[in-house]
């Protein structure tokens, strides 16, 4: 997430916002093993307790951005603390209680990779890079290479505790329509393993406040489609009345010259014109790769 925020596509948004990145307990780089007596919080408790961070930092309102398990946690936060949450951007989200370990082992059986267990690290790799493993000819070698790239400084024991908490999460699907009162945008890559889960979640949400965006030809939104994702976030924030000073691509003041080469001023697009529907301007999903 931090790498995405530092990307050039996000530059104009970053200049106008304050970002608070939240690590799960024991997930900071170089973390030591959590003590045996540590009772790892449930996913519901993590969602509810995010408000203590806002209170500590004296932040009144937020627009939340969460990816994967983080999207599930933020959804719970949004339902519990609607007065503090202006909106939610949920990347590759899921609301139901799925058996990821079973899906992982079914895929491993199909790949015919021996001695591969549903450990926390392997499940995280599968969720994040499943599409790359699917395309690789040598699955075992590809998995080992991805393991070297992913979370080398993360404490595996602590990650496992978080994965266990996520595997034991409750199903929040039935509560979405009634309890999630803020606007939400669900964004999923068309190649992501979470497409079905995201579509399922969207079915149970208030359609007057919720939209689902599928980005073509990508699986990992943060890494593979930063420009489209940035545009989606900007459009969502503008719809909430924030970041209105940030121009969308193709909107704004242009300079030109007349027939004699003298500079002229062209009128910026008016708010009245800007508010008129323009399907091409609002489309941020296309068949072309970035």
Image: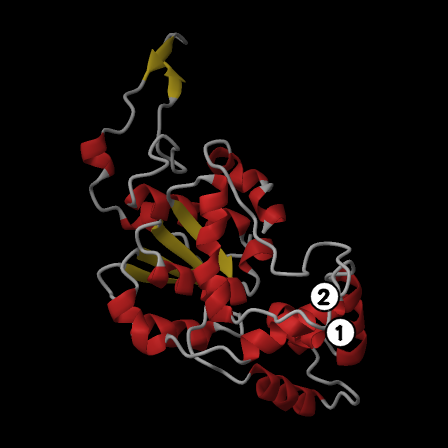
Q: Is residue 143 left or right of residue 101?
A: right
Tag 1's secondary structure?
helix
Q: Is residue 40 left or right of residue 76?
A: right
In this rendering, position of residue 41 left or right of residue 63: right
> Which residue is painted at 72% across and 65% down in the image?
34
Decide which of 162, 129 is in the foreground and name it. Answer: 162
**Residue 163: which quarter of the image?**
bottom right
Q: How many marks?
A: 2
**Is residue 75 placed above or below 58 in the rendered structure?**
below
Residue 5: which numbered mark, if any? Answer: none
Q: How far across and how far down the image is residue 288, in percent?
A: 50, 57
Between 6 and 223, the one lying in front of the other is 6
Q: Is residue 186 above or below residue 114?
A: above
The residue sitting at 31% across, 78% down in the picture is 174
Question: Earlier along the polypeptide chain: callout 2 or callout 1?
Answer: 2
Q: Is residue 101 visible?
A: yes
Label 1: how many Cα within 10 Å (few below 14, some 14–19, many 20+): many
Circle 1 residue: 143
Is residue 251 shown above or below 228? above
Residue extending furthest toward the front: 37
The answer to whether 253 is drawn above or below residue 182 in the figure is above
Q: What's the colour scheme?
A: secondary structure
Percent position of residue 212, x then y: 36, 63
Q: Position of residue 119 (x, y in %)?
A: 70, 79
User: Which residue is found at the position 53% from the left and 45% from the top?
Assistant: 20
Mark 2 crowd level (few <14, some 14–19, many ≥20, 10 Å Cα): some
> Does any portion of residue 131 appear in the rendered image?
no
> Helix or strand or loop: what does disc 2 sit on?
loop
Q: Which residue is mark 2?
A: 34
Label 2 to label 1: alpha-carbon separation: 27 Å
């Amino acid at each position: 997430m931090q790498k995405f925020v530092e990307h050039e596509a996000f530059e104009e948004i970053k200049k106008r916002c304050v970002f608070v990145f939240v690590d799960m307990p024991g997930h900071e780089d170089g973390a030591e093993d959590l003590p045996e007596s540590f009772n790892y919080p449930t996913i519901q408790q993590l969602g509810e307790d995010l408000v203590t961070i806002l209170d500590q930092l004296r932040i009144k309102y937020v627009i939340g951005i969460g990816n994967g398990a983080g999207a599930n946690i933020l959804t719970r936060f949004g339902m519990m603390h609607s007065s503090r949450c202006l909106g939610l951007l949920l990347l590759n989200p899921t609301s139901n209680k799925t058996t990821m370990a079973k899906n992982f082992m079914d895929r491993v059986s199909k790949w015919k990779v021996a001695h591969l267990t549903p450990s926390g690290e392997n499940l995280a790799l599968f969720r994040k890079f499943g599409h790359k493993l699917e395309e690789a000819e040598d699955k075992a070698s590809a998995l080992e290479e991805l393991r070297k790239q992913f979370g080398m400084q993360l404490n595996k024991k602590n990650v496992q505790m978080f994965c266990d908490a996520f595997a034991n999460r409750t199903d929040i699907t039935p509560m979405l329509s009634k309890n999630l009162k803020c606007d939400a945008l669900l964004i999923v890559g068309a190649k992501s393993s979470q497409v079905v889960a995201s579509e399922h979640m969207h079915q149970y949400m208030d359609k007057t406040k919720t939209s689902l965006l599928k980005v073509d030809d990508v699986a990992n939104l943060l890494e593979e489609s930063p420009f489209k994702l940035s545009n989606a976030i900007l459009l969502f924030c503008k719809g909430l009345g924030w970041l209105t000073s940030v121009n969308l691509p193709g909107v704004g003041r242009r300079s030109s010259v007349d027939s004699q080469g003298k500079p002229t001023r062209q009128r910026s697009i008016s708010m009245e014109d800007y508010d008129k529907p323009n399907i091409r301007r609002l489309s941020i999903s296309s068949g072309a790769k970035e």
